[in-house]
Image: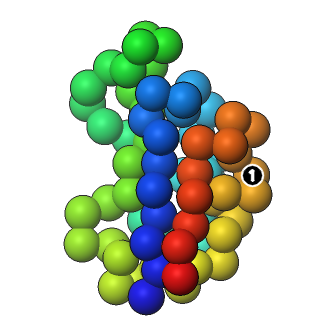
Amino acid sequence: MAKIKIDQERCKACGLCIIYCPRNLITTVKKINKRGVKPAQFKKGAAAQCSGCTLCAIICPDNAIEVYK
């Protein structure tokens, strides 16, 4: 079981992590961050499904995602 930490203030909402997550475990929040965008968020209850592949962290251009196994 892996855990993903997303720095929502650093996220620019490019959506790459959402596209590349093979299990579709990342979504956006409704609250706008300091950049004026709706950042990415790990879906609630998704930790049990995450394989820890790190594709989301690798593809993030802002280094806003950390994956812990």
Left/right of residue 49 with respect to residue 51 in the rendered view: left
Query: Left or right of 2: which side holds 46?
Result: left
Q: Is residue 10 above or below residue 60?
A: above
- Quarter of the image for residue 21 reads bottom right
Q: Secondary structure at mark 1?
A: helix
Q: How many marks?
A: 1
Q: Residue at x 60, y 72 (%)?
A: 22
Camera-side residue: 18 or 58? 58
Q: Is residue 36 visible?
A: yes
Could you tell me residue 37's position as x and y percent?
44, 19
- Does residue 19 sit above or below 3 in this rendering? above
Q: Amino acid at mark 1?
A: Ile
Which residue position holds label 1? 59
Q: How is the image coloured?
A: rainbow
Tell me the residue at 53%/82% (across/down): 69
Residue drawn at x 24%, y 63% as measured from the top left:
44
4 displayed left or right of 19: left
Figure quadrant of residue 57: bottom right
Q: Position of residue 56 (x, y in %)?
A: 63, 58
Task: Please name the residue shown 39% across and 27% down the image.
Answer: 38
In the image, is 16 to the left or to the right of 43? right
The image shows residue 27 at horizontal and vertical percentages of: 40, 49
Tag 1: Cα neighbours inside 10 Å, few (<14), some, or many (≥20)?
some
In the image, residue 31 above or below residue 50:
above
The quadrant of the picture occupied by the N terminus is: bottom left
Residue 26 visible in the shown view: no
